[in-house]
Amino acid sequence: MTDKMNFQADVSKMLDIVVNSLYSEKQIFLRELISNASDACDKLKYMALTHPDITKQSGELKITVTPNAEANTLTIADNGIGMNREDLINHLGTIAKSGTAEFVKNVKENGSAVDLIGQFGVGFYSAFMVADKVEILTRRAGEDKAYSWTSNGIDGFEIAEAEKETNGTSITLFLKEDQKNFTDTIYLRQIIRTYSDHIDYPIVLDLGKAGEETVNTASALWAKHKSEITQEQYKEFYHHISKNFDDPWMTLHFKAEGNIEYTGLLYIPTVTPYDLFQPDRKQGLKLYVNRVFISDKVEELLPAYLRFVKGVIDSSDLPLNISREMLQQSPLIAKIRQGTVSRILKELKKRSKDYDDYIKFWNAFGIAFKEGLYEDFSNREEIAELSRFASTADAEKLTSLDEYIARMQPEQKAVYYITGDDVKTLVNNPQLEAFKAKNIEVLLLTDPIDEFWTQTLTKYKDFAIKHISQADMDLSLKRDDVKADEGSLKKLTDMMTELFKDEVAKVTTTDKLTKSPASLTVENGQMSIHLERLMRNHQQQTAFASSRILEINPYHPLIIKMADSMDNKDKEQEIKDISRILLDQAKIAEGEAITDSSFFSEKLSEYILKAM
Ligand code: ADP
Ligand code: MG
């Protein structure tokens, strides 16, 4: 009995892109199918740990590539786990992977997909780049029934019961007329060596009458000695394991010896993956025990702030028959994690000495890495040392905390920062005027995460880390310019406090401003205006808003004029209007929305006109 089924809409869209817009590098389909075959062998090997009876008859695990020039077909077969009917339906056609819609969107925006195919887990479908029909014959290990799956890659697929002696999967591509070169053994050998040499199972090329030939080295790369591995091999393995196609920014291959032995081959990508902030992203490390693949879901292997690290950990000290649940509580895993994290941090420290090089890493992953500042208590100081920040000292370069400290003023006791939406708005914040005048550097923090780590990391080495509103040094600017009369100033601030009683707690004078007539701040110890805005944007009703203070600059000619006119009844409305404009300007400088924008622009034009 044959069942006809349609592809899910997202799958259809994605197939259309894969088939019709990818002209170059068609050969990657072979890498994808071999990679799937290798995964299937890994799964069978894992199953063998608990079901030796089922997997016994399988024989040596291998992948066979068989070209047939006469029929213009290419078959990729494995004796791995195989698929049953549900597997075929679920994995190949009806349920789009979570990344599929993202893939379609990305290709539409960026116009290229070759690099993304593997990353979005749509590798299988690349077969339709070279084939106008694909036929799968498969039987799942431990089950009796075999199935065939056939599709033209356009509207859907057919599934039927079939005959197959052994477990595993055989995928036959009926090549398009113009893709005959994929039956050429010389070409096939070259593609396999280029993209799949590191595969841990023999890839056997069927040469017809000339017999069979194992084309790859078939050994686990991480188990080899560094000196036997070329940069190309490292890179190719990175592509395989990460499903990314950039160059790795960092390759870290190590063997830990001592109470627990393990090998790590870890990579940091160059390019930020699309799913860095998606909760359902794949965990980056694969765990092997003595080269037997155990799991790629052991979240405990690395802390979340290092989730961009890809690679393999292989330990011979873990029991082979360990269940995935047991792994989660294993103290050995905790030790491996600890060791691995400190190796990564050590390597980052080395690389951090070269600014241009390190900043590539920082720009791609710093935003995730900073989560470690509050997540990883034991490595906090090192993570802080490795973090980089925009600062008022240099608009072109990011700074480290150590560099900041080296530039501190003699009387300075703290590292100061300000938070906001973007650097451009922040540098113009009036609250920075006193710091600029006194040559005190301020870090400009613009990631939402900055609001959180600054709550917990309040000290670095001997110095406190403080928001500028909490500065406890004397920031007043002593000067002998003309200042508004104290009595009139008092009347002005009293009038403004009353006028804005629903918006600010009070209006006061400050001698910390230079250019600006007014500025907003919060009462010491309260949530910053930026954090309050972030929480509001995330619909998190804050229990109470911070009480804000509007500070005015008594040396500013406008404030002097306003104060001087306080006793003039005719000017009363004008002073109120201008006060409102000042509050609005202060809000804008903070990146806040103003309450009544039409009032703001009308009044502003009105007064500009008067002045002309
Ligand atoms: P991914 O490999 O990222 O999961 P693919 O599109 O390459 O995405 O494959 C989809 C799924 O189809 C696999 O996850 C697997 O469940 C199944 N599959 C593909 N090829 C094989 C195979 N040779 N043996 C067993 N299952 C396979
Ligand atoms: Mg795949």
Image (cartoon, grey):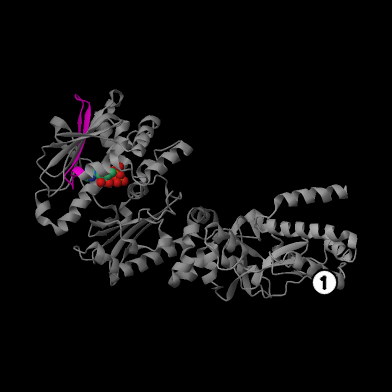
- From the viewer's side, name the closer residue of 565 and 279: 565
82 inside magenta stretch: yes
Measured from the top left, where is residue 185 in percent x and y? 23, 32
Q: Is residue 225 visible?
A: yes
- Is the residue 119 above or below the residue 46 in the image? above
Q: Amino acid at mark 1?
A: Lys
Measured from the top left, where is residue 311 in percent x and y? 34, 55
- Is the residue 61 above or below the residue 488 in the image? above
- Is the residue 34 above or below the residue 384 in the image? above
The residue lying at 27 percent from left, 44 percent from top is: 91
Magenta segment: 64-85
Which image quadrant for residue 541?
Answer: bottom right
The residue lying at 16 percent from left, 46 percent from top is: 140
- From the viewer's side, name the closer residue of 314 and 425: 425
Q: Is residue 34 visible?
A: no
The residue lying at 52 percent from left, 58 percent from top is: 538
Looking at the image, residue 215 sits to the left or right of residue 122; the answer is left
Looking at the image, residue 209 sits to the left or right of residue 252; the answer is left
- From the viewer's side, name the closer residue of 544 and 263: 544
Measured from the top left, where is residue 137 in percent x and y? 17, 37
Looking at the image, residue 329 sits to the left or right of residue 374; the answer is left
Q: Quadrant of the N terminus?
A: top left
Q: Secondary structure at mark 1?
A: helix
**Ligand 1 is found in which quarter of the picture?**
top left
Measured from the top left, where is residue 423 in percent x and y? 62, 55
Mark 1 sits on what residue?
Answer: 490
